[in-house]
Amino acid sequence: LVLSGILLIMSLLVTSTRVFSEGFAALWSGTMLMFLSIGGTMIMRKFHNSFAVGFFMGSVVAMAQLFLLLFLVYCGYAKDRSLAAVGFQEEFVMSILCLVQCVLLASFAMILGAHRSDIMVKNTTTNAGEESTQGESAYEPPRTS
């Protein structure tokens, strides 16, 4: 979440000093990352059905791919700006942050994929309408005071 905030602040700085396409890419990726953080928190705490967990896992993989592409785009911007003898430090920092975010999201997606059955609720409904738990007890998120 801290890296998401840093990327969002950097995107706001980039938006004001760069062309529209670069600023939009930075702002969009930062905003989407904040939405992924908020939505992921909701899914991991409250919604433990297979659809929600699968949607979240797909969103994390898609965001990892987005940040891999943004890493390459920012590397290209940095190279173009260095060849034009203009400052390129912001693009270099953004490319490194995007690569770090890509690795973090990809590793989280792998961990989530490996443990998705532990996250999902294992309750089924019997013919009498009662809920029964198969196997171990269902996961319950920690209670907050």
Image (cartoon, rainbow, N blue to C red):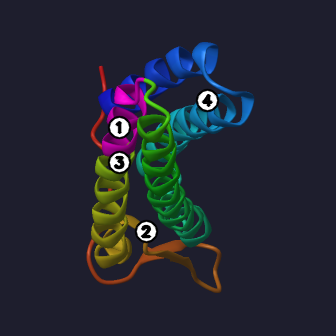
Say which residue label 1 marks.
92
Q: Is residue 143 above or below residue 120?
A: above
Q: Are marks 4 and 3 in contact (CB under 8 Å)?
A: no
Secondary structure type for disc 2: loop
Camera-nearest label, 4 or 2: 4
Q: CA distance from mark 3 to mark 1?
A: 14 Å
Q: CA distance from mark 1 to mark 2?
A: 40 Å
Residue depicted at 55% across the width and 17% down the height: 12
Instruction: Give residue 101's mark.
Output: 3
Disc tally is 4
Q: CA distance from mark 2 to mark 3?
A: 26 Å
Q: Nearer the viewer, residue 145 or 81?
A: 81
Q: CA distance from mark 4 to mark 3?
A: 15 Å
Residue 51 quadrant = bottom right
Q: Looking at the picture, which amino acid does disc 3 mark?
A: Gln
Say which residue label 4 marks.
27
Instruction: Give residue 120's mark.
Output: 2
Secondary structure type for disc 3: helix
Q: Looking at the picture, which amino acid does disc 4 mark?
A: Leu
- Image-based side of 116 in relation to 34, left or right: left
Sequence order check: which comes first, mark 4 or mark 1? 4
Camera-nearest label, 1 or 2: 1
Camera-nearest label, 3 or 1: 1
Q: Quadrant of the N terminus?
A: top left
Sequence order check: which comes first, mark 1 or mark 2? 1
Q: Are marks 3 and 1 in contact (CB under 8 Å)?
A: no
Q: Main secondary structure of the magenta part?
A: helix
